[in-house]
Image (cartoon, rainbow, N blue to C red):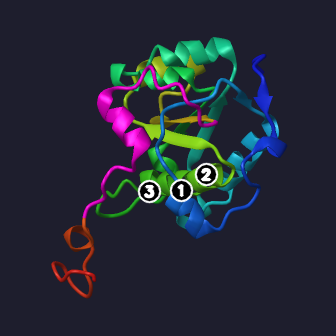
Amino acid sequence: MSKRLFVGHSHLSRDKMEVEEAIGKRRAKRAFMKSGIDSKIMGRLVEAIRLSASCFNNQPWKVVLVDEDGPLDELRESLSRGNRWATRAPLIIVVTAERDKDCLLSDRREYFLFDCGLALGQMMLMATSMGLIAHPIAGYRPEVVREVLSIPEDQVIITLVICGHPGNDTSLLSEKQLRDERERPERKPLNESFYLGRWGVPFK
């Protein structure tokens, strides 16, 4: 465990939050405090993933929580330039899965990806309810992550989730990222993505 100052359970903004409120408050923010996340809080994030639904209860996910300075520094080397903000986070959660360990469907759907997405969505709401940021990213070099953490070749490295307590230091953020920090990025209108009864009939 790193030697950072930890913000424990008693310092969280609230212990419980309604699901609808957590959905509304969840944001992919990028400014972090320096304080780490203690093991009890990490345990609650893990449990949110562990209890998630999956095809035939296959639970295809494998998860590595990284909060020690040495491995964190090595993982930070894998990040794309646009994810420099993530170098300040005290916890990176690496999510992997093996294709053949989940439902194999006749139309070749990659169902293990769906199951892992369900689990991470549940974990992100748990993080939000505890006043944390949990921000999944795709911009990293998986070969570096694989080497640093000794991840087997049969595992697909699906995402890195950047976790920590919200902070005020925005010096590593681009102009667009600063705008997104202040206001939630605009969502598509309902009639563009949601239909009722059949394709193309807008849900209103």
Q: Position of residue 160 (x, y in %)?
A: 50, 34
For residue 184, above or below residue 65: below
Q: Amino acid at mark 2?
A: Thr
How many numbered marks, from 0 up?
3
Who's the residue at 40% across and 25% down the image? 173
Name the residue beneath numbered marker 3: 114
Left or right: residue 17 compared with residue 26: right
Name the residue beneath numbered marker 2: 128
Res 97 seen here: no
Extreme residue toward the bottom, this view: 197
- Dominant secondary structure (helix, strand or loop) of the stretch shown in magenta: loop
Q: Position of residue 18 (x, y in %)?
A: 65, 68
Which label's residue is closer to the chain start, 2 or 1? 1
Q: Kindly identify which numbered label has been placed on residue 194.
A: none
SS class, disc 2: helix
In the image shown, does 115 or 181 lie closer to the viewer? 181
Who's the residue at 18% across and 83% down the image? 201
Res 37 seen here: yes
Mark closer to the observer (2, 1):
1
Extreme residue toward the right, this view: 10
